[in-house]
Amino acid sequence: MPEYEYLQYEEHDGGQIVRILLDRPDTRNAQNRGLLVELDDAFRRAEADDTCRVIILGGTGPMFSSGHDMGSKQSLDDQQNHPTSKIDGGTREGAERLFIQEWHYYFQNTLRWRNLRKITIAQVQGQTFAAGLMLIWACDLIVASDDAYFADVVGTRLGMCGVEYFAHPWEFGIRKTKELMLTGDAIDAQEAYDLGMVQKIFPVDELSDKTLEYARRIAKTPTMAALLIKESVNQTQDIMGFHNALHACFTMHELNHAHWAWVHTEGQYPVALPDDGVIDWRNPEPMRTTTKDTVTGPEIPRKKKS
Ligand code: ZN
């Protein structure tokens, strides 16, 4: 079994099902560069193995993923010293550096995982914020725990127009995306289910077993049929504009970074700061769910770090 620093890699049923778990529970599975590079390797490993039919992507600890790692020591170290920080635009200047780096390590990798030849199932507990959504939206199916919440907070906390892989309108819906992005509010598992974003909801302590059971059911479908079902839907979505819209929105995302870097002429910091009018992400207000009959909905339960 491959050894990873930031992941667990499990094989089930003689390798027919592979489960990859993000394994940085102390950071709520925040995604540092090392984790993302390992994740690409793990997906590629499962993809290459013809025995594997279904890949489950989950996370250890109380929360699937808090998004990109913005501040841990490991993340800051990766930004300076990870081998991939010196290639793929990492040595270029100005907006070009982030444009090419994010293209490879946030955008194209997510798109590559969306287009794997295997069926993928996200197994999601607790809260999934911002770039955590990118990982689950790249999957074909999503199984959530009953304590799951989903939110993209980068509009209200970072002054950004969404994460790099802008699937939001396809997942939340057109107007719902505007509402959620403009308020930073979350939706719960039931609302995600009602939107068609989530396929199953299980009690959190049954999530792991039930997702595996679900994967076993999906794995029975002949591989060629499964692939062509996936591709028929994905190619339809691409013809509807998904592929082009993702690229257009990635470009806007980079424009948004360039804007903040321009505003912060001294620090070149490419996202908004509290002085720019956003919520301080290091000390945020409680997250709330969107509700139809109140301007400000109830707070979602805080998850303790494990
Ligand atoms: Zn970005």
Image (cartoon, helix red, strand yellow):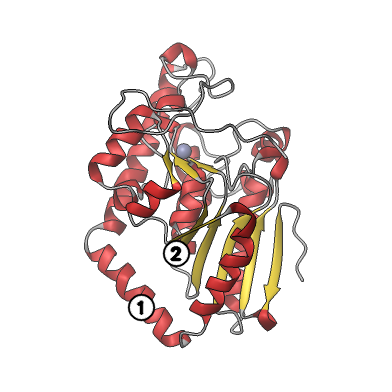
Residue at the (54%, 73%) spot, across then down: 215
Q: Is residue 299 above or below residue 100?
A: above
The quadrant of the image that shows the N terminus is bottom right
- Could you say which is closer to the camera, residue 201 or residue 228? 201
Question: What percent of the width, then of the height, locates residue 37?
Answer: 63, 54
Q: Is residue 92 above or below residue 46?
A: above
What's the amino acid at mark 1?
A: Ile
The quadrant of the image that shows the C terminus is top right
Q: In the visual, does 172 lie left or right of 84?
A: left
Question: What percent of the width, then of the height, locates residue 195?
Answer: 32, 52
Q: Which mark is residue 141?
A: 2
Question: What percent of the width, then of the height, locates residue 83?
Answer: 68, 48
Mark 1 and mark 2: span between their CA atoms? Answer: 13 Å
- Could you say which is closer to the camera, residue 192 or residue 5? 192
Residue at the (46%, 25%) spot, across then down: 157
- Could you say which is closer to the camera, residue 198 or residue 88? 198
Q: In the visual, does 111 lie left or right of 170?
A: right
| Helix, strand or loop for disc 2 | strand
Residue 137 showing in the rendered view? yes
What's the amino acid at mark 2?
A: Leu
Q: Which mark is residue 229?
A: 1
Q: Which mark is residue 72?
A: none
Residue found farthest to the top: 275
